[in-house]
Amino acid sequence: MHVLCDEPALRQAVEAWLVDSRLTPARPIELRITLVKEPWSGEDRRRVLRQPDLAFYYGPPDDRLRLVWRGGLGHAVVSVETGAATVEIAERIASSPETWLRPFLVLVVASQLRGAGWSHIHAATAVDPRDRGWLIAGDSNSGKSTTAALLASRGWAVGTDDTAFLVDGPNPVEVVGWHEPIALREGGYQLLGREGGQFLARRQKTGFLPEELGGRWVDRVTPEIVAIAAVHEGPTSLEPLRPALAVADLLSWSLLFVVDPDGAQRHLELVTRLAAQARCYRLRLGRDIFERPDLLSELVP
Amino acid sequence: MNQRYQRHPNVRLTALEGEGVVLHLDDRRYFTVNATGLTLLESLLEPRTLDDLVAALVREYEVSPPEARATAEAFLKQCTERGVVRTLEA
């Protein structure tokens, strides 16, 4: 991944962040970053998908995606075909890249990677002691990160706690994880019962790399088990889930980049292949998992 | 009676173990359909009349034409209301 920027400090910060991610896409991607005095305030009349802090413009007559973050403080245009991105960062936030690298530039990079056949999904990935690959999908309060941290502390290999990419290629589907700290809210941090960690001020979370918890990081996981996770009050349980329902759930955690008809079909087929190759479960996470951390692998024969 | 129907061009469909998952790109809604719904939506890739759909169900499943007609009519009603299937001008 190549970063072009006239500001050496900024370029180094972004390069270091990308190196830390350990992503190795099959084809090079290029980020061209410029500092601008004022936030982007242009107009785009195409279809728009609005998320908290982000507007995502797409569709004809342009094949490019436009991402506008926090009212234009971050602005990017990504070519679907080539994966090249031009990024504008407002000067007022340039000196604090921790505020925009993860919430904004991750999405720019994810947009670029679509062209390389990588499809973004919010999911955790892990490999259990029996060498079985897991993909655990769910929303930001589903217990993915706390579970990933717990599993790492039991010696599992963990790829990511949230930012994953389904890789389009020969069967089976592989999932690439973004190497970064597993980010725990205060509740998860307390449940894990570990000292230390890296305080992630912007996110108000505490981060641990898998290797800091006694596990290891793994770049690619081939899921044999897909679990759609949610926290609940009762005991931890796994119930078999029909693959079609798993596909529908997986779609809900990966809809951001389903913006063009061809890309949507590719993504749908990729998610379908993933559900077909794996055993799918509805995972209800209870607090008992902290008393019996090996419960997850025990629940799956 | 010659009214024709077709799947909306922005609907994407995938099949898995006899069920279907439908994704509508316009509003990013998605839902699953059973085997009968999958048969009908696969058929509706091309313009079809109600009679065509009834024939498809009778061919595929052990159902009588009246049962197949009732199923197809109910499914078309749901799908047209959701924008998954379009009614074509005669």
Image (spheres, rainbow, N blue to C red):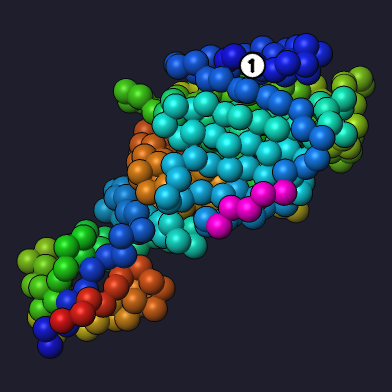
Q: From the viewer's perspective, is A212 left or right of B52?
A: right
Inspect this view and state whether residue A124 appears. no
Name the residue: 29% across, 50% down.
Answer: B15
Which quadrant would the C terminus of chain B be assigned to in this image? Answer: bottom left
Name the residue type under label 1: Val
In this picture, which residue range is highlighted in magenta?
A41-45
Which residue occupies 83% across, 28% down?
A94
Query: In the figure, is residue A207 to the left or right of A240?
Result: right
Q: Does residue A248 lie above or below B82 as drawn?
A: above
Query: Who is closer to the viewer here, A36 or A202?
Result: A36
Q: Tell me, yes or no, whether the highlighted magenta stretch contains residue A164.
A: no
Where does the image place residue A240, in percent across and percent down from the top left? 47, 47
Is B55 above or below relative to A217? below
Label 1 CA crowd tier, 10 Å (few <14, some 14–19, many 20+):
some
Q: Which residue is mark 1?
A: A3
Point out residue A268 in the picture as x, y percentages from the top left corner.
39, 44
In front of the other: A8 or A137: A8
Which residue is depicted at the point 11% across and 68% down?
B56
Report in which chain the residue with disc 1 lies: A
Asked if A75 appears above or below A33 in the picture, the reply is: below
Can you name the residue that lies furthest to the bottom here? B1
